[in-house]
Every structure is written in C-alpha cells, then in structure tokens.
Amino acid sequence: MSSLLSGPALVLLDHHEGTVRPPVFELLTAARGLGVPVFGVWFGDGLEDGLGALSALGDAGVARVYRVGLSGSGSLAPDSRLTPVAAEAMTAVAVEQAASLVLLTSTFENKEIAARVGAATGAGVVVDAGGVAVTGGRVVADKTVFAGTWNTRCAITTALAVVALKPNSVQAEPADIPTTPEVVVVDVVVSDRALAVTLVERTERPASGRPELGGAQVVVAGGRGTEGDFSPLEELADLLGGAVGATRVATDEGWIGHDAQIGQTGVTIAPRLYVGAGVSGAVHHRGGMQAAGTIVAVNSDPEAPIFEIADFGVVGDLFTVLPQAAAELRRLKG
Amino acid sequence: MRIVVCVKHVPDIQAERSLGPDGRVVRDDGDGTLNELDENAVEAALTLVEASRAAGGTGEVIVLTVGPEDAEDAVRRGLQMGAETAVHVLDDAIAGSDVFGTAVVLGAAIRFLGADAPVDLVVTGMAALDGLTSMLPAALAAELDLPQLTLAAEVTVSDGVARVRRELDVATEVLTAPLPVLVSVTDQANEPRYPNFKGIMAARKKPVTVLSLADLGVEPSTVGSAGARTEVVEAVARPAREHRVLITDDGTAGLQLAAFLIENKFV
C-alpha cells in the first residue's frame, strides 16, 4: 500500500458554537492515516476563545486551521450555513493548497457541500463512506450499499478526491504527537449566485441530552407497537447509554419528533447495537438501520419482517419484555 | 409557470438488488419503478402549477429522465399523475455515469427545454432510493448555475420568489430565492396523488420525446463510465447474519435479553 498523495488532507471542522462535533475527530484520525499533512477549515467564531477547540484539534494532529472570513456583494454577510457558500470556501482553500483530499462528516448538508466542491473542481466524490485509504496512489473509500447488504470499495480517479465519512465508522484516536495548529485567516469572496438564497429564519432544536442519533453506538427504536408510549424504550436507552429513534409511523403520529426518524429519508444509522421495539421492519426503515452490528427486535407479531434480520428476536409484548430486561440489567449492574 | 421535474427509474427496493461484475448497479432487468421520492417531486410541481393557474397564470409540468430503455416507465408515471410533457434522454454512452455525468445530461436537457420557453423551476426528489447519495440536486444546481433550495418540506412561489421550509437534523429553516431556482423536496412535503383512470387514459395520448446526447450537444466522453470520476474496484455481497436467535416470551424473555446484552458487552 503506497501513500503517494501529493497534497494535504483538508477537513471540514463542524462545530456547534466552538465545540467541535465528535465525528470530526474520527475524520482527523482517518486523515492522519493517509500520510499527508492534515489541515482544517473552520467557519464562524469559537476557534480560539477559550473553549479549547484549537487545543483539541492539536491533540488530533491538525497542523493548520484555515479560519474563513466571508464577504460578498450583498448587504448581509454571507451565511456559511448555506451549503453553496460553505462549498465555495472549501473549494477556494482546497485549490489554493492543492489538497489531495477533502474530508467531511456525511450529513445531508455536508453531502451537498461535497457535491458542489466536486462540481467546482472536477473532483470525484464518495459520500456515506465507512473508511478511506490510499492504494496505488489513489484515494479508495469503503462503502456499504443497498441497505447494508453489499460492501464496496470505490477508487476516486481524479487528482482531488472528496470523501464524506459516516459518523461512527472510524474509531477516533488522539495523535501520537499532538500539534500546535497554526491558524491562518482566509478571506473568501462569495459569488452572487451563492448569495441569491436568503436564510430567512432558522430555529435550532433543543438538544435531548441523549447521544445524537446519527452517531450513537446504541439505538433503541420504537414503532407502531409502542402506541405512543416510549417510556420503556427510554428507560432501556438510558441504561445502555443509547439514543432513542423511531420509525416513520411513530413520527407521523406525532409520538416523537421527526428528527428521531430512522429510515432512508431520515437518519441512516449503523450503531453497534440496534434494539427495535414494536417495529415491524418495513423496507423503508430497514434501509436506515440494516447495517447495524447487532440487531435486537421485540414485537408481538411473529411474522414481522424485522425478525428476518434480527440477531436476537423476541416475539412478545415490549411493555413486559423491555422493563423486565431493564430491571435485570439494573440488578446485575448493582 | 414552467417546471421541469427530474425523475429516476430505480431497481425496486423490495426486490433483491445487486452489483454486477463491472461494479455497476444491475438495471434494466424488468424489476424497476419510479423512484418513490420522485413522486413527491411530481406532486410538488403539479400543486405549484395548479396554484399558478388558480391565480390566473399558466403552467406546464415536464417530467424528465435519463436512463436505459425501461426508464421511460418513470416519465410515463409522471404523465399519469398529470404532467403535460415527458422527455427521456436515452443513449448507450450514458451508462456508468456518476452523479456529475448525470447532472451534465440533465442540465443539457433542461437547457434544451429552456430554449423553447424559460424554465422557472427544476424540482427533484431528495434522493434516489438506489444510490441514496442525495448529491444530484446540488450537482444539478451547480451545473445549471441555479440557486438551490433543497430538502424542502414545504415550497411555495409568490411574485417570482420561491420559499421553502426545511427540517434539518438540528434545526428548521426558511429559505427564499428569486426564480429560476432548483428545489428538492422531501417525503414530508406532500402526499403524492394516485393517477386516476382519466389521468391514465390521457397519459396514453401524450408522447414521450426521446433525445440522444447528440441532440443535446453533449460530448460522450464527459459522461458515462468514460467521464466517471470514481470506479468500483470491489463489490461483495455481505454474508447473511449467523447464529440468529428467535424466542417467544414465556415470562423470561426480558431476562434472556438482559443476558444477551451483557454477554455481548453492550452494558
């Protein structure tokens, strides 16, 4: 295996008000494994104001952070939360630095950024990848497709590669030798085309206090069988340190927020453990969780399709089985 | 208001899907269907045009697809739902296209249609249920140099401005942009109408315009596998899960589940 990439890896440093999002450390771990300098791109404030972002990035081996300032012909400052704006900045830095790889966490928005960087630069793009390596001088990404039923390896044949990695695919590790990242301020003038979209309003959702669904190692999901009562699932999730998810049925009924929906049009997850309670396992939902490491299912219907893919299936009443399991876990944990 | 809706014919996700020895998705084997998420796109376009007509304006919905022969089924379905016009870009050289090649072809077709009369909106679904990358809307917007309003749960047009509400993981947003724009809609955006008998009969009389790359002035080397920027170097079906357990609750299932979780170190 050769590491003949010519230019640095450029990582999009997703953060929330100065706290770097956990999957970014997974990206940085993957980037370090490629044998090239690792640079980051940071939008907005919070990099150097005492919240520790810069030193956390140094612990992860980042050599340099490009802190982006945006300007444009309009009266309002360009908003980096608009993906075409962020993409123009990523492209500018990638081209100027002759990057060989742009790495992002695979989210709906970042996949748009990936597509636009590809469109602007001619780079090949792989999103929803499970891993990235260099083979024969090319970036090669691992990816499972068709609801986790096929494993593929995709080589990117262009000089610049763009890869979006799914959260929880790579184990984040600190760098052997921490760095003190250099901070370089970069001013990007955003095109009028990217400024044509106005972000009129944005309302953040309150955080639940549980792990974020997309990156959680353990997910307990509920469907029609919960009949709106998620309490046994929440109890089990809390014992396992997991996130709570749901099927489209449950979110449509309003039993839980739409952001909990696991499925091809909601969140796609690949946790180590998935527990589906009162979930029938319809194709749309399966497509969003079939790649989970271990699948547990509890459903009163023995014909439920989810039993076709469960490693441990229980035909039973979730309102009996889950509390009994939770009580037993509490008893054994002491 | 003139709207082009891009639709895709995909292998049926309920059937077994596979990759061939060349690493490409096996298509054209009779088990395909209009991508379910594109039904929401057609519905959104039809609703916008109906609103335009109700306000005294005009409107036309054109459904457009790129794909092998049986991809025609996707635009036929759009005609049955009520679209006026259907276009199918069919050319052997398109096979093996990556998302950028597809965007080049769709973009050329939309510019071709725009030469007759301006296109006000391009509408797509949020993802194709085979590839699931969700990259096409952004790539197509870039190709056409149109503002993009993606992942819309709601879209309206008023006084030449499109407005969308989008539900993201972490937030709800409202975005606007002046026409022409590209919009992608999610499955939350609407309930697609079922074609009724009248629609199905009327659709039979509507022709599907078939175009080749030459008709669109697209260089074959820029699309298809010739133009692709990625290459599947390995594709292996994952083995089925082994050692699966299925029990019926006899009063101890919860205890057995707890034991399983502990044994497998999930606690």
Image: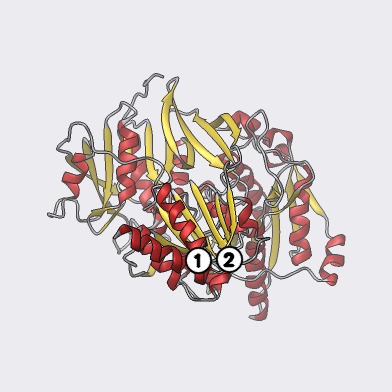
Left or right relative to A281: residue B174: left
Residue drawn at 30 percent across, 64 percent down: A75
Read off the residue under disc 2: A316
Read off the residue under disc 1: A321
**Distance from Cα at disc 2 to Cα at disc 1:** 7 Å
- Local packing at callout 1 (Cα closer than 10 Å; few below 14, some 14-19, many 20+) is many
Q: Position of residue B223 (x, y in %)?
A: 62, 35
Task: Give whichever of B147, B189 is nearer the camera.
Answer: B189
SS at mark 2 in the image: loop
Q: What sort of colour scheme is used for the picture?
A: secondary structure
Task: Give whichever of B75, A150 is nearer the camera.
Answer: A150
Asked if the residue under mark 1 is in contact with the one under mark 2, i.e. CB atoms within 8 Å, the reply is yes
SS at mark 1 in the image: helix
Kind of residue at disc 1: Val
From this viewpoint, is residue B171 visible?
no
Q: Position of residue B191 (x, y in %)?
A: 64, 71
Work out which quarter of the rendered image holds the C terminus of chain A and state it.
bottom left
Residue at the far bottom: name it: B55
Task: Give whichever of A94, A129 is nearer the camera.
Answer: A129
Work out which quarter of the rendered image holds the N terminus of chain A and state it.
top left
